[in-house]
Amino acid sequence: MVESVVYKNHLNETFDFGKNGVFLNESELHDYSWNVTKKNNMIAAFDYAVSTRKFPVTIICASEAEGIARRNALFEVTEKDVLALEYGRLYIGDYYFKCYVQKSVKKNYLASKRYMTVTLTLATDCPYWVKETSTVFTAGGGAADGVDYPHDYAHDYGNDTISKTIVNSGIVASPFRLAINGSCVNPSVTIGGNVYQVNVTVAAGEYLLIDSSVKTVTLYKSDGTQTNVFNNRNREAYIFAKIPAGTNAVVWSGDFNFEITLLEERSEPQWT
């Protein structure tokens, strides 16, 4: 079965593969390769580096006008990312792959404007597929009963906190984005026993964003101003600790709303 794939550039313009006369053939999109670091003739580590993936595309449209439009759209949507040096995203199902279209080789385009074959080469320095899953936690809801978790956390959580759970369905711990909405003072959220706290005041209409994927802690003010508040983090816990796989307790004061977005990373997207 031919996969449906969508390319979305940094301006949110899209190009669909798998419909409108554009089809994706067998490709390298599901392929991957780790670099191996050796020490004393033994494997010491694995890592990714800048890599490329090729996939062939066939354009076969009902009319010549449509064929020309598809050719031009494929170039224009993807080229904007290269010129802006901003990632595009290639989507398969719920997963996306950050990349640029580095190369495009065309064949079989002279006989008819309806038909052309293209081999695209994607270049990336983030060669993994990402699935984003967001969960919103709201203020209030009453105090939770004291919770005694099966893990040895620093303390049991009492009646002045709210306890919920979040499920990381990935196979390993995942990076995350934690967005905390104001108003609140020195907001703290404990996830899986790790404390994520920043000692700042977040006014109404502002939000605090902890982004573990790029290692930033930023306060976004209502006038659009962005302030780096990394140095205000609670230094007794690692602010960018990944969220473990499985079910994790989420504990906070209940005084503010926040959203956790898990960024599940995989070497290949799930097959569907």
Image: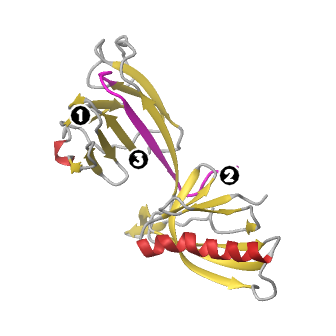
Please name the residue shown 57% across and 65% down the image.
32
Q: Amino acid at mark 1?
A: Ala
Q: Amino acid at mark 3?
A: Pro
Residue 51 seen: no
- Tell me where residue 238 sits by quadrant: top left
Q: Earlier in the sequence, mark 1 or mark 3?
A: 3
Mark 1 or 3, which is nearer the eye?
Answer: 1
- Which portion, as a residue range, is magenta? 252-272
Residue under numbered circle 3: 175
Q: Is residue 45 left or right of residue 76?
A: left
Please name the residue shown 38% across and 27% down the image.
250
Out of 217 and 127, give the one closest to the viewer: 217
Tell me the element at label 3.
loop
Out of 135 and 12, give the one closest to the viewer: 12
Q: Position of residue 162 (x, y in %)?
A: 36, 19
Q: Position of residue 71 (x, y in %)?
A: 67, 76
Quadrant of image for the N terminus: bottom right
- Tell me where residue 206 sits by quadrant: top left
Q: Is residue 225 left or right of residue 58?
A: left
Residue under numbered circle 1: 203
Q: Residues within 10 Å of mark 1 (few under 14, many from 20)?
A: some
Q: Earlier in the sequence, mark 2 or mark 3?
A: 3
Q: Is residue 114 above or below residue 204?
A: below
Residue under numbered circle 2: 271
